[in-house]
Image (cartoon, rainbow, N blue to C red):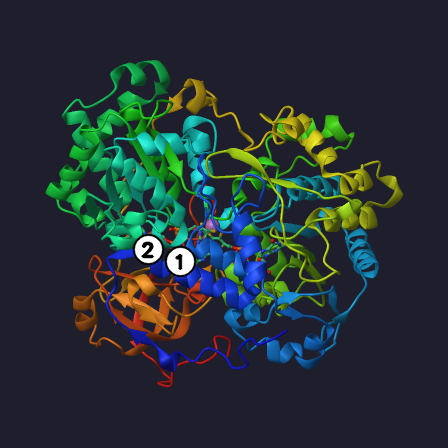
Amino acid sequence: MTGAPETDIDEADLVVGQPTDHVAGPKAVAIALKRAATQMGPARATRALTALNQVDGFDCQGCAWPDPEHRHKAEFCENGAKAVAEEATGRLIGAEFFAAHPLESLRTRTDHWLGQQGRVAEPMVLRPGESHYTPITWDDAFALIGEELRGLASPDEAIFYTSGKTSNEAAFCYQLFARAFGTNNLPDCSNMCHESTSVALGETIGIGKGSVSLEDVHTAELIVVAGQNPGTNHPRMLSALEQAKRNGARIVSINPLREAGLVRFKNPQHPRGVVGRGTVLADLHVPVRVNGDLALFRGIAARLLEWDALDRAFIDTHTHGFDEYAELLRAVDWAELERGSGLSVEQITEVAEFFRDSKATVLCWAMGLTQHRNSVAVIAEVVNLALLQGNIGKPGAGLCPVRGHSNVQGDRTMGIWERPPAAFLDALAAEFGIEPPREHGYSTVEAIAALRDDRARVFIGMGGNFVAAAPDTVATEAAMARADLTVHVSTKLNRSHVVTGRTALILPALGRSERDLTGGREQRVTVEDSMSAVHASRGPLTPASPHLRSEVDIVCSIAEATLGDDSSLPWSQFRADYSRIRQSIGRVVPGAAAYAEKVDVPGGFVMPHPPRDTRTFPTALGKAVFTASPVEILDVPEGRLLLQTLRSHDQFNTTIYGLDDRYRGVKGGRRVIFVHPDDVTALGFADGDLVDLTSEWLDGSERSAPSFRIVSYQQPRGCAAAYYPETNPLVPLESVALGSQTPTSKSVIIRLTAAADQTPLVQRWP
Ligand SMILES: Nc1nc2c(c(=O)[nH]1)N[C@H]1C(S)=C(S)[C@@H](COP(=O)(O)OP(=O)(O)OC[C@H]3O[C@@H](n4cnc5c(=O)[nH]c(N)nc54)[C@H](O)[C@@H]3O)O[C@H]1N2
Ligand SMILES: Nc1nc2c(c(=O)[nH]1)N[C@H]1C(S)=C(S)[C@@H](COP(=O)(O)OP(=O)(O)OC[C@H]3O[C@@H](n4cnc5c(=O)[nH]c(N)nc54)[C@H](O)[C@@H]3O)O[C@H]1N2
Ligand SMILES: [Mo]
């Protein structure tokens, strides 16, 4: 079955209207069902959607927002349904497709086109110098990988990347294999995502995870949503916010853009949402300047100290470093905070009053805070705010980093981490009798540099779309092309399959919606959500093709083919029965004792979190730590804009579902740049002009991305926004957050010039 578009995106069809003030409602339901039915057919769609997020069903492949205890019959959102449709599509591509499309032509296609072709049906290989991918048997593919890995001068010449959809079982096997092979080169999408959160929380509260439950969100007095667009990226969070609102909560949104979801929400699962005007969620929208959050938070903290709106008992008993921090607060330079945040003292004070008047505050954040040069300091400042009022480890309060990929948190728990804690490696050694390497491995940006400098020769990707998601597209693609072997375990075709090493493999995996009969029995996997709740997931659908294998099977087979008979590791037992993997997880992973038994309980269990559970802070000092960081202001030179790169309503990261960004009023195109109307004029342009974007980096180097339409859009002066991944070529590999190495995708200094070519770019890769 095909039916995918033959031609590529034509940006000439772009239409821009008004942004909307409400989200979801019946229109979202209709769109979700239509997408699902077109891609899957009505029977398969019904089957999939009725099992989505149900206790005995499968976990949504979309975001990591948790499932409520009392589930609706339709416990999913528009974008969750799109994610399922994307995976469970009836379109299939196999040998014939690859014979008809030489690599050279696939390279000119956009990620949208590649993804729309369908599920990859069988393993494919691209041999050195050949023009086409051709079929390969699974055994030959595994043998090829094993031979290549064994031939490396050092295990550190191999890179084992993970995207955050991988199940806990597959992730655990994958990291075990990498370490038995001899390297900690386990970068993951987290390095580009919430790493700044993990680092900041690790340093300040002793554990790199959020401290709230869904119940806390429901019962909070104040919920702050900073740098996050839940209406698009975590739509089910809106139901939780709506419930909180009904319980009397107030909501503050801190965002350069007035994102529609927080303005008015029509809950499609609720009769009022279908017929009424919906609920106004945000009581206050704070239009902070891009990267202005630290200045804003510092000002709020200064006011709280001034008003003595502090939880002194909590500070005295549970924290360290208050005096030094308080000194900073007493000395704040308000003019500097105004300049840094782009807000007036009155605006900052108004937000502070919301904090002062709340006895239980939940602080939520996502990419708007994590992808800047000083992101670790920004998030440490969020923690400072929470500590001042004792908002950790009490009902209705806490830190709520909202994760992206559905199992990104679980993958890290399972040991997908280039800097594993010693205790984890000790436990791995004790369980399996291996001697895991102790030196840290490469993060995502270090992996790219290693490929570029020929220090790495083999790249294996467990899901994801490494070259499109990573920064500095031109440099990253050139680095990837230097590899001897690139392997992608994937469901759908993407850019990383067509920008390859000398030899390349595509290994098609079962998706989460599909029945997994590995080892001749019905297998389940487990995942962990953003609030540390772990539960089982089991797909109901017949696999897209009989040749697909589970990620667990693929990892175990690569391990056997690489480590051979020398290895006493139980790969075949793992593959035959995943509960055997869960038993090992229970013995190795901290806090996961009796894992295999606990995930058998319907609904699963919650991983321990000492600050949340008992106000115990496992830091070096045994207390939560106040951080006194300087307020650094990113100065943007005259005539330049500060660009943040974000998601449209019609994509999941590099997977482009369609070309509309309904809530922001954009239809039929993605190459747009949102600019304040006065900046448009001041820069000598008009709404709708076609411009090229050029980024300017400290070392004087420049990078460009051609052909974007200017869309006048309300936001603080001097800021701009455009979609990722089209803008990734603008972000230098070296431009990373201090301490976390997260690419600074939300702080890119650019200038606009009239497009050199005034015909809109039809294909992204000329
Ligand atoms: N449908 C869908 N769902 C998704 C994804 C998807 O692509 N599509 N991706 C998943 C993944 S991996 C992730 S990590 C999450 C991402 O979820 P989000 O973090 O919501 O994603 P972004 O689109 O990057 O949006 C960042 C938000 O921060 C704001 N922002 C930008 N810069 C700043 C700043 O300096 N300060 C403040 N206060 N705000 C700022 C932007 O205006 C925008 O509203 O979503 C997950 N869920
Ligand atoms: N400029 C800029 N860059 C960014 C960001 C940004 O905001 N701005 N955000 C960053 C963030 S937050 C993230 S998380 C990364 C995302 O980086 P990645 O996680 O690497 O990218 P995705 O686009 O989510 O990967 C999509 C691919 O995963 C494969 N896939 C999907 N489902 C499955 C499955 O079940 N199994 C397997 N094996 N494969 C599957 C499909 O082949 C699909 O093409 O991008 C980062 N890059
Ligand atoms: Mo992410």
Q: Residue placed at 63% from the left, 60% from the top?
A: 491
Return the x and y of residue 244 as percentages of the image width and height.
30, 36
Asked if residue 283 is positioned above or below residue 131 in the image, the reply reads above
Tag shown at residue 151 = none
Q: Residue placed at 63% from the left, 31% from the top?
A: 600
Element class at badge 1: helix
Question: Would residue 703 be visible to someone looking at this image?
Answer: yes
Asked if residue 590 is positioned above or below residue 40 in the image, the reply reads above
Quadrant placement of the N terminus: bottom right
Q: What amino acid type should be assigned to the residue bearing mark 1?
A: Val
Q: Choose between 671 and 294: the one closer to the eye.
A: 671
Label 2 Cα neighbours within 10 Å, binned few <14 / some 14-19 / many ≥20: many
Q: What amino acid type should be assigned to the residue bearing mark 2?
A: Gly
Q: Choose between 671 and 718: the one closer to the eye.
A: 671
Label 2 sits on residue:
25
Element class at badge 2: loop
Q: Are marks 1 and 2 in contact (CB under 8 Å)?
A: yes
Asked if residue 701 is positioned above or below residue 185 in the image, the reply reads below
As drawn, is 617 to the left or to the right of 637? right
Return the x and y of residue 131 as percentages of the image width and height.
71, 78
Q: How many labels were placed on the picture?
A: 2
Label 1 Cα neighbours within 10 Å, binned few <14 / some 14-19 / many ≥20: some
Give the Cα distance between marks 1 and 2.
7 Å
Q: Residue placed at 35% from the left, 20% from the top?
A: 320
Q: From this viewpoint, which residue is outermost toward the left?
A: 346
Answer yes or no: disc 2 within 8 Å of ligand 1: no
Question: Would residue 465 be visible to someone looking at this image?
Answer: no
Answer yes or no: disc 1 within 8 Å of ligand 1: no
Q: Residue placed at 84% from the left, 36% from the top?
A: 568
Return the x and y of residue 389 as percentages of the image width and height.
27, 24
Tag shown at residue 29 = 1
Return the x and y of residue 461 as percentages of the image width and height.
64, 55
